[in-house]
Image (spheres, helix red, strand yellow):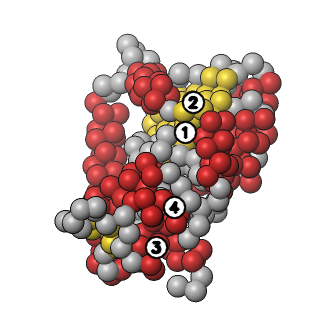
Amino acid sequence: MADDSEFLSRLMSFGLSEKEAQTYLHLLKYGPKPPTLLAKSLKTYREDVHRMLTSLIDKGMVNPSLDSPTVYSAVELETALDAALKIHETGLRDMEVKKLELMELSQQNRFRPSDEFTSYKIFKNLKEAVAVMQSLMSSMNEEIICIFPEIIFVIASLFGLNEEIKRFIDRGGTFRIISDISYPSIELVQQELDIGKDIRHIEGYAGLFFSVYDKKIAVSGINVDIRRASLDDPISGLWSDDPKYANYLVSTFELLWAQAIPAAQRIEELLKAGPPQA
């Protein structure tokens, strides 16, 4: 474990968030700890540590003691990774089922309003997804909403999405995004706030990723497991111009938006806590 950054990156490829990976690695390296000491070692809030520990217990990667006060220990690495793999495999099977259900719904025209034609398209990699988003943003004028993993900030910066978003905002459009913001993304998030995006944070979000354009066109993720900003990364998603499906996603977004905290507040909290220590 000489290179913690590489070890953390590999852990995250098993479906752990950055904070979960840091917490598990710390327990693996330094042995069992109570939440208070763990929060001090990781230079974060005790509430954050409790959330990470609860999630890691659910994933089968951390065990609590039966003593009081409770201490938490890392499960042996191979056993922990086997448990994470099972969860990941279950998630993929669930997404395959959802994909089939969505395709069946399209065939049955359940979302089709009156006699209007509704179309669905599947994209299969990040390059196609970026092209879809660029095309949609160039033709929209009112509002775009998104809930995406944190790496979207890197993707938007690298592949020209921010330029298209700025033109959309300059035309009078509003752009709102929800993500799980961590310390490494502070600068990128601030840049996006500066161009007029309205961004909020939800801790540990693990639900459906999607975006909706002018409440008419929706792009929802089927498999959005992006670990690096490479256009060749295999992801899959569904494009739909069904307004009923778009309205359903808008309603979901608004519920989450009401629960989320402003990005500026999240950045202030992260800066106050300082960079995480492995």
For image coordinates 39% across by 16% down, the residue present is 113
Query: Disc 3 designates what residue?
Result: 25
Q: Nearer the viewer, mark 3 or mark 1?
A: 3
Q: Amino acid at mark 3?
A: Leu
Determine the residue located farthest toward the left in the rendered image.
66
Query: Disc 4 designates what residue?
Result: 40
Q: Nearer the viewer, residue 148 or 72?
A: 72
Task: Provide the secondary structure element on which disc 1 rests.
Answer: strand
- Examine the image and state in which quarter residue 4 appears: bottom right
Query: Disc 1 designates what residue?
Result: 201
Q: Residue 61's spot in the image, x, y percent? A: 32, 69
Q: State how far apart marks 2 and 4 are (Cα).
A: 37 Å
Q: Are marks 3 and 2 in contact (CB under 8 Å)?
A: no
Residue 211 in view in this figure = no
Q: Nearer the viewer, mark 2 or mark 1?
A: 1
Q: Residue 161's spot in the image, x, y percent? A: 72, 43
Q: Amino acid at mark 4?
A: Lys
Q: Which mark is residue 145?
A: 2
Task: Provide the secondary structure element on which disc 3 rests.
Answer: helix
Badge 1: few (under 14), some or many (20 or more) residues near its Cα, within 10 Å?
A: many
- Examine the image and state in which quarter residue 24 appears: bottom left
Up the image or down, 104 lies above or below 92; here it is above
Q: Are marks 3 and 1 in contact (CB under 8 Å)?
A: no
Task: Provide the secondary structure element on which disc 4 rests.
Answer: helix
